[in-house]
């Protein structure tokens, strides 16, 4: 487990499946995410049962509040292997009453620290929709900088948005 001032990152288990499924089917939570196709809870349980265990290729942690030990979201690092020296970060806070409270920023910092110190990464990158200003603000607070842009890659409400590539090198974490 990785512990900060207000959140803890921990491995997810079978008891977390229902919350994870609920988040993936909430249009507000998944607004800027690629959530795939809808699944029943039973289908999602079967999918999760086949999910590979934590490894260098992919590590997923649940984000839990310290105050009440409540699972509120998840964060993931995905790599192409240790030779690449880099990973892609995905994160979301699934419990909407926890939005805007700094949990995502702290979880991002903890996961990046884990990537740099434990996984010995040199670089962490992510993609974010240009209209997702709250996420961009949180990523900048953690130390990410804009590195590029892919035009018209995310559609929300019939409007196309650019995806911004953001990255952080070891030593840039704030």
Image (cartoon, rainbow, N blue to C red):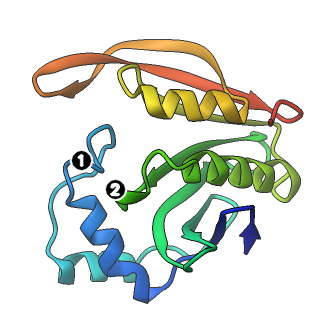
Q: Nearer the viewer, residue 72 or 163?
A: 72
Q: Nearer the viewer, residue 121 or 19?
A: 19
Question: Looking at the rendering, which quadrant does residue 53 occupy?
Answer: bottom right
Q: Residues within 10 Å of mark 1 (few under 14, many from 20)?
A: few
Q: Nearer the viewer, residue 100 or 82?
A: 100
90 lies above or below 39:
above
Residue placed at 75% from the left, 68% from the top? 3
Residue placed at 33% from the left, 74% from the top? 19
Q: Quadrant of the C terminus?
A: top right
| In the image: residue 120, left or right of residue 72 | right
| In the image: residue 75, left or right of residue 98 | right
Residue 142, image x and y in percent? Answer: 70, 36
| In the image: residue 110, left or right of residue 71 | right
Q: Quadrant of the N terminus?
A: bottom right
Check disc 1 and report its element: helix, strand or loop: loop
How many numbered discs, if any?
2
Mark sitting on residue 164: none
Whether label 2 touches label 1, CB < 8 Å: yes
Q: Which residue is mark 2?
A: 96
Q: Which residue is mark 1?
A: 28
């Amino acid at each position: 487990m990785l512990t900060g001032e207000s959140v803890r990152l921990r491995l997810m288990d079978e008891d977390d499946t229902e919350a994870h499924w609920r988040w993936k089917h909430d249009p507000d939570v998944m607004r800027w995410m690629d959530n795939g196709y809808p699944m029943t809870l039973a289908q999602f349980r079967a999918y999760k049962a086949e999910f590979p265990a934590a490894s260098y290729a992919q590590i997923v942690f649940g984000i839990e509040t310290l105050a009440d030990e409540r699972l509120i979201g998840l964060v993931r690092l995905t790599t192409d292997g240790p030779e690449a020296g880099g990973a892609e970060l995905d994160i979301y806070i699934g419990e909407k009453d926890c939005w805007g409270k700094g949990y995502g920023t702290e979880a991002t910092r903890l996961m990046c620290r884990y990537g740099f110190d434990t996984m010995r990464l040199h670089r962490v990158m992510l993609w974010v929709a240009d209209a997702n200003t709250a996420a961009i603000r949180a990523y900048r607070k953690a130390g990410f900088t804009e590195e590029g842009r892919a035009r018209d890659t995310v559609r929300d409400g019939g409007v196309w948005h650019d995806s911004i590539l953001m990255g952080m090198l070891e030593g840039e974490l704030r």
